[in-house]
Image (cartoon, rainbow, N blue to C red):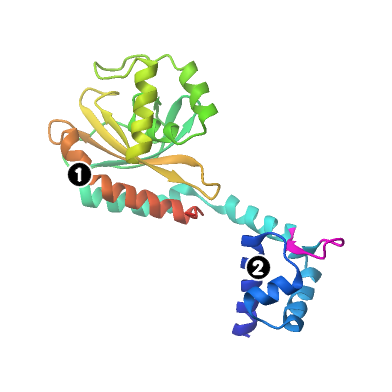
């Protein structure tokens, strides 16, 4: 029974990677005799898990897998998946951890783990912040398609929130390139004078960056140079969350 299931999975995985294949190609690649493969294919065809092109006689995955995938995707709750890792980050850093997404030219806080230290920053789940002066906003924007970046940057007002806010478009575009190159975003007191922050991108099954996880600290106890020390564990947790959302690194 286990061996039979394994063979089914091998056929499905091969078709997922290769697209359309003939019976002989499947048998050759899996090193299983044609009669056995044909029997498995007949069963998969019967239940619409695969389809066969009547002209080329090639097999490919059927819409049944799309229905299954859609159901799985719809059941994914990024907050439930990410929350345990946000807790781990707070326990490791003792600083405030946020999970954010973005809408247009703003970021939205969708989860938060408060710092255990006595002096804390003010933020709430549901709060919004500008995309151009937050680490999370910049890291999400930096990994969008060029046309999306160009449109949003073109429409940004670049309103200064502090003396460190980037207000020049060309400088901001260069900053986004730096974010892509190093793999994480930085807010050097650009949104609030007393706060610094670093953020890492979270990718989902579609390989798109739709979320970010960030570490924020009060400058009086931890300036940016000290906060950046946590970049590796931050990126590591972001990558773990990405994998649990279905991201597969190629």
Along the line of sight, the residue nearer the viewer: 133 or 19: 19
Left or right of 133 on screen, residue 50 = right
Q: Secondary structure at mark 1?
A: helix
Image quarter of residue 44: bottom right
Left or right of 237 on screen, residue 150 = right
Along the line of sight, the residue nearer the viewer: 70 or 33: 33
Q: Give the position of the N terminus as an image quadrant.
A: bottom right
Say above or below: 180 vs 41: above
x then y, percent, for residue 181 = 35, 38
Along the line of sight, the residue nearer the viewer: 56 or 194: 56
**Residue at 34% in and 15% down:** 167
**Residue at 61% in and 66% down:** 13
Provide the residue designation for mark 1: 229
Asked whether the viewer can see residue 38, the reply is yes
Residue 220 inside the magenta-drawn segment: no
Left or right of 58 on screen, residue 126 = left
Q: Main secondary structure of the magenta part?
A: loop
x then y, percent, for residue 26 = 69, 72
**What are the residue bounds of the magenta stretch?**
53-62
Residue 60 inside the magenta-drawn segment: yes
Which disc, if any, is residue 12? 2
Mark 2 closeness class: few <14, some 14–19, many ≥20 residues within 10 Å: some
Which disc, if any, is residue 218? none
Q: Secondary structure at mark 2?
A: helix
Say above or below: 136 vs 18: above
Image quarter of residue 123: top left
């Amino acid at each position: 029974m286990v061996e039979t299931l394994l063979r089914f999975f091998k056929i499905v995985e091969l078709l997922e990677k290769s697209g359309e294949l003939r019976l002989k190609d499947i048998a050759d690649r899996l090193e299983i005799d044609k009669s056995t493969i044909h029997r498995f294919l007949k069963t998969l065809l019967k239940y619409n898990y695969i389809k066969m092109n009547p002209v080329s006689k090639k097999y490919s995955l059927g819409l049944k897998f799309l229905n299954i995938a859609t159901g799985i995707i719809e059941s994914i709750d990024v907050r439930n998946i990410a929350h345990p890792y946000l807790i781990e980050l707070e326990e490791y850093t003792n600083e405030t951890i946020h999970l954010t997404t973005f809408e247009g030219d703003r970021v939205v806080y969708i989860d938060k783990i408060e710092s255990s230290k006595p002096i804390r920053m003010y933020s709430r789940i549901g709060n919004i912040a500008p995309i151009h002066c937050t680490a999370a906003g910049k890291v999400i924007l930096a990994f969008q398609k060029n046309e999306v970046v160009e449109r949003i940057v073109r429409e940004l007002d670049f309103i200064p929130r502090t003396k460190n806010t980037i207000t020049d478009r060309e400088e901001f575009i260069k900053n986004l390139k730096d974010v892509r190159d190093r793999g994480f975003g930085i807010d050097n007191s650009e949104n609030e004078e007393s706060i610094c922050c670093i953020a890492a991108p979270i990718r989902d099954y579609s390989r798109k960056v739709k979320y970010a996880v960030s570490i924020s600290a009060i400058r009086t106890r931890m300036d940016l140079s000290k906060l950046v020390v946590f970049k590796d564990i931050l990126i590591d947790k972001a990558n773990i969350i990405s994998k649990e959302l279905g991201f597969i690194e190629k």
